[in-house]
Image (cartoon, coloured by chain):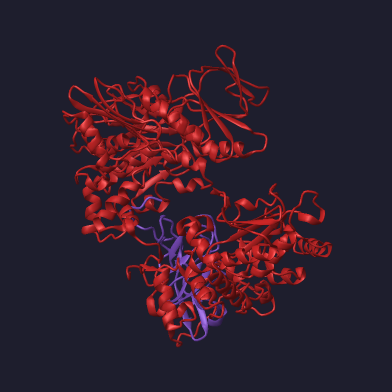
Chain colours: A red, B purple
Amino acid sequence: MSRGESAGIVVVGGGIAGQAVVEAVRDRDRDVPLTLLCGEPRLPYDRVRLSELLASDEDPDALTLRPSEWFADRGVTVLTGQRVARLELEGQTLELEAGATIPFTRLAVATGSRPLLPPIPGIDLDGVYAFRGPEDCDAIRSAAASPGVRRAVVIGGGLLGLEAARGIVAQGCAVTVVHLMDRVMERQLDAGAAELLLPRLRELGVEVLLERETHAIVGDERAQALRFRGGEELAADLVVVSIGIRPEASLAREAGLRCERGIVVDDHMRTSAPGVVAVGECAEHRGVVYGLVAPIIEQARVAAATLLDRSSDPYRGSVPSAKLKVAGIDLVAIGAAEGDSEAISVDAGAGMYRKLVVRDGVAAGAVLLGDIRGSEALLAEIAGAEPVPDPLGRLAAAAELGPEDLPDTAQVCNCNSVCKGELIAAVSEGGCATPREVMARTRAGTGCGSCRSSVIAIVAAATGGLNDEPAYLCPCERQTREELAGAIREHGWRSVSEVTHACRTGRECGVCKPALAYLVSEIGENRHREERHARFINDRVHANIQRDGTFSVVPRIHGGVVTPDQLRRIADAADKYQVPMVKVTGGQRIDLLGVRKQDLPAIWRDLGMTSGFAYSKAVRTVKTCVGTDFCRYGLGDSIALGIEMEKAWEGLHTPHKVKSGVSGCPRNCAEATVKDIGVVALEDAWQVRVGGAAGGSVREGDVLCTVKTRAEALRATTAFLQYYREHAEYKERTYDFVPRMGLDEVRAAVLGEESSAALIERLRIAKAATRDPWLERDAPYHPRQFEDLDDPDSPADADEVLDDDAEPTLVGPPEDGAR
Amino acid sequence: MIRVCGVEDVPLGEGRAVVVGGRRVAVFRAEDGWFALDAACPHRGGPLADGIVASRTVICPLHEHRFDLATGEERSNGSYCVAAHRVEVRGEDVYVVDLTNRSRGRPSLEMA
């Protein structure tokens, strides 16, 4: 890179701080040459949300703050994976580790921090991780999920440590947090709140050991245990260290900038070197290093003004405000946790603790646990150091305040500095109608996300009550399932396109087309006109799309009972089509994974079995235990009932997938109590449960009824299935549907003699019109149902010269600027 | 201008993929006309040709990112962008007119 006058501003560090500086500079100057150097091999991402990543299976890209186009469009040069080896102040250059030299006229150092690792024996063992970047997240996630790992330990009970622990629990691993101090989050919480937090953490599966000083991590190659001072040991095959951060100031320090813990900056974020500012976790302002998003964004704005020689208000420090981002726990800590006057309101049984701290007569801090109402108002008062003559009264009044009661000047989103007035303006002037639109326009709620519920409440108040917004089948047109069902019945519409033409349903974004397709088919009792464009790809090709675009094939195996001949055909098909994986499913079936779309018809033909609908919102499996034929405990013939149920229902689509099970005795080997529809045989009786779940949600099914005979059990379950088909919202599982309707309501409809008979009759009518979709192997709805346009034998890549006289009849995308 | 298929090769309201000029492109027959985008979703490479097509958008079947068929810009909550190509229909034949090399970035303020 050549040296020139236009070297411009260079930002070192691709974290939240570096990104904030880039944005603040570009907000003020669109032309100054601007370069961002990222040490990590990726664009800046939202590190604050790393613990969410740990708890979910989301991919790290979801945390990226801005796509590469954003930088390109704004003339920002971004170099990723480029670590800076040396800062040369005199010559105003940066030497990259890779060798290149980058000149700058102004420099922003935003090198962030690195995790603090205690210098104890065993810290280098396998199985010991810091928690800092997406790589750590990946490593911890896969370690937590690996079979050898039974117990994870997080060293450090601060905010990050607790969030990490919750993330590991979500991976299904028992977690203990060990903490040096006598309370968790001692920097943000007082003893009262910290104590009440412990039972809440325990409910989430996080155990906490306090006052434990880890002296060593014990193990040969891998970590096996922690040894505490005093000799006590705690087994641990996965150790995550989260005891704090250290400002990453080495680059600045070696260049001769004045550093204490961090790089020392003044109120304009200037370092000791002219033309060089520092921002974020690497910077130390008035003796404080800030590690929270809101202060960093404030700093970045001041720093940008300094870099551009513009005037700005000086940075005078921030009131720290932290929110624990752990699902299931509401906790906000603002400013000081203790002071000379404190108003406290506690309900220990409910896990509620609210405290307002007053120093010298002005609001200085607050701790809100279990009930965080009024936190925005309190933050505003604490930041403004407002006088509080009556702290108890103030605390009580704050609990009455919803976000809609805030003054327009109160900041709602601290990450992006969006105040309430801007949200209201987005509705009243910007024409936004939904919280999502307001968030997209103002960026409120797009940082750490903790203010989203406030944003939603404020938008609801501003738009006149989105809170009672019904569940729209088509949100674009604001049409509910009931409204559309009424219109479809009234007009006798038999296809999705008739509804779309008349009501515009699904026209705009298409998201609701599958819901509409289900509604049309359900009302038409499967005698509707099927339009595949309204179906998800799985229901167009009757197989489940996989991450690489291939499909999985699951034939129907009633009740999990299979014949040797079927197994042979499955094995032969797997060989013939070189199926990469054959897997036995949890629903007692066999899954052929990685099949190419164009091979689907042939593999179905070879299998000679019917579709298992494993790709669809439909009746899936009926899992059974061995029952009475062989099991010496069996009380009822679970296999027979399971097969009867599956045969009575197979081929029916449902609002969401329906998984069922029948157990032959209360030992419940078919796990029937956690199925959408489950039956358990008792002594001379069958117990029918509905609304159970054992996936992302776990719920024991409600007992619908206990009946004497198998036939009665079949009738009750069948009536329930049809009731669900007719009344649930699309994508509403039974475990949400049953509580929403209320068990009494469900019982009345499903068990009443007349209503039950009518439900069963309607199900039979709908069932009679179903056919095995795999028969489309011989009668496709379109010649290219299973094919793309590529003909492997003659690629369509040959240019064909066009006759210029021919007129275009349809034209695709408009030219640039025509939008 | 390269012929990619006949009008009847793509069912109404669906898409199909094809290689054009060494590049895999998804051709869509939407209610508002014919469109073409690069075939792979910029998020995780999902097959856009298998997506649900509305009047002017397509939804990737893997993770529901939704793109404008005319511009390639994301219309759901992210800021991905996929290259959009001009399509013309003459008689019974569908042509891709010229291949765009770069997706048009969206000057939006949304976070990815």
Q: Quadrant of the C terminus of chain A?
A: bottom left
Q: Is residue B9 or residue A468 the one in the foreground? A: A468
Residue A336 seen anywhere in this rendered image of the structure:
yes
Q: Quadrant of the N terminus of chain A?
A: top left
Q: Is residue A4 above or below residue A519?
A: above
Residue B100 seen anywhere in this rendered image of the structure:
no
- Residue A448 in percent (x, y) is at 38, 42
- Residue A19 in percent (x, y) is at 36, 41
- Residue A154 in percent (x, y) is at 53, 28
B59 relative to A714 in the view: left or right = left
A373 relative to A81 in the view: left or right = left
A301 relative to B72 in the view: left or right = left
> How many labels sit on residues?
0
Q: Residue at x 51, y 38 (%)?
A: A167
Q: Residue at x 30, y 50 (%)?
A: A457
Q: Is residue A736 above or below residue A477?
A: above
Q: Residue at x 46, y 39 (%)?
A: A50
Q: Is residue A47 or residue A266 the one in the foreground? A: A47
